[in-house]
Image (spheres, rainbow, N blue to C red):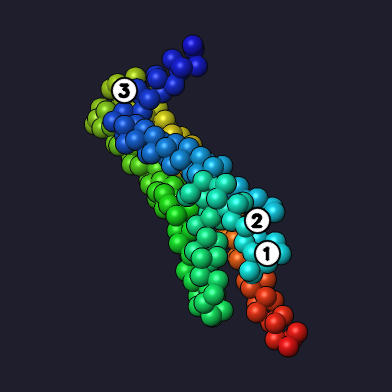
Amino acid sequence: MLDWLGIVEAARVGGWIVYPLSLLAVIALIVILDRTYVFWRFASLPRTAGTRVDMTEHRDIDATLKALPEPHALRKLLMPLIGNAGKPVWWIEAKSQALALEVQRDMARGLWVLETIVTAAPLLGLLGTIVGMMHAFRLIGDKGLVNPTGVTGGVAQALVATAIGLVIAVVALFAFNYFSRRVDRLVDELEAYANAWLSDVRLGREQPVETA
């Protein structure tokens, strides 16, 4: 209880700049929770999919992909390719690259907000610092220090605003780096699955020629 009272008191001392900082914190939290759910629900890759699939018999991989949620990254990548397996290889390769970029864009949605908050939060904290220091120095008149309590309050406002901005920026930075790494790793794994499937397609097309 005392901890919560301390947080509320610190926010009160921080002044009006705490409100935009709180808004940034809420937005960052929403983006983090949203991306956490998306990666947990739609980016966990089954290790059996995309391995040694017969070009003429796709029941196994079809069953695996259809068992995944419709927005799942692997399903969004491979289902259109399997449906066009009869088209030229160059077309399939171009299509797979376009689908991989689309999946990457969907998975990285909202990360630009975190990146913006990483920069904006410390700047807002710095603005609170400047406002607090201006308030503190304004209380020092020609006759010297006339209101010690007001001066210390202004300094406290400056320090609280800076601290809050830095905390928000640090949390957003760690989350941004983590999710960016997850996106890169996901794209690499999707490309590996697509290449494995495309290799089976090429092998299936070359085998009749070798037999003949």
Point out the frontmost of discs 3 and 2.
2
* Residue farthest toward the bottom in the current orientation of the protein: 212
Q: Position of residue 64 (x, y in %)?
A: 61, 51
Left or right of 145: which side holds 80? Answer: right
What residue sits right under mark 1 in the picture?
53
Q: Amino acid at mark 1?
A: Val
Image disc number at residue 79: none
What residue sits right under mark 3 in the picture?
150
Above or below 124: residue 142: above
Of the residues under marks 3 and 1, which one precedes in the sequence?
1
Left or right of 18: which side holds 98? Answer: right
The alpha-carbon separation of the residues under discs 3 and 1 comes to 74 Å
Front residue of 86 and 191:
86
Left or right of 32: which side holds 181? Answer: right
Q: Would residue 176 be seen by someone viewing this image from the given angle?
A: no
Q: How many marks do you count on the picture?
A: 3
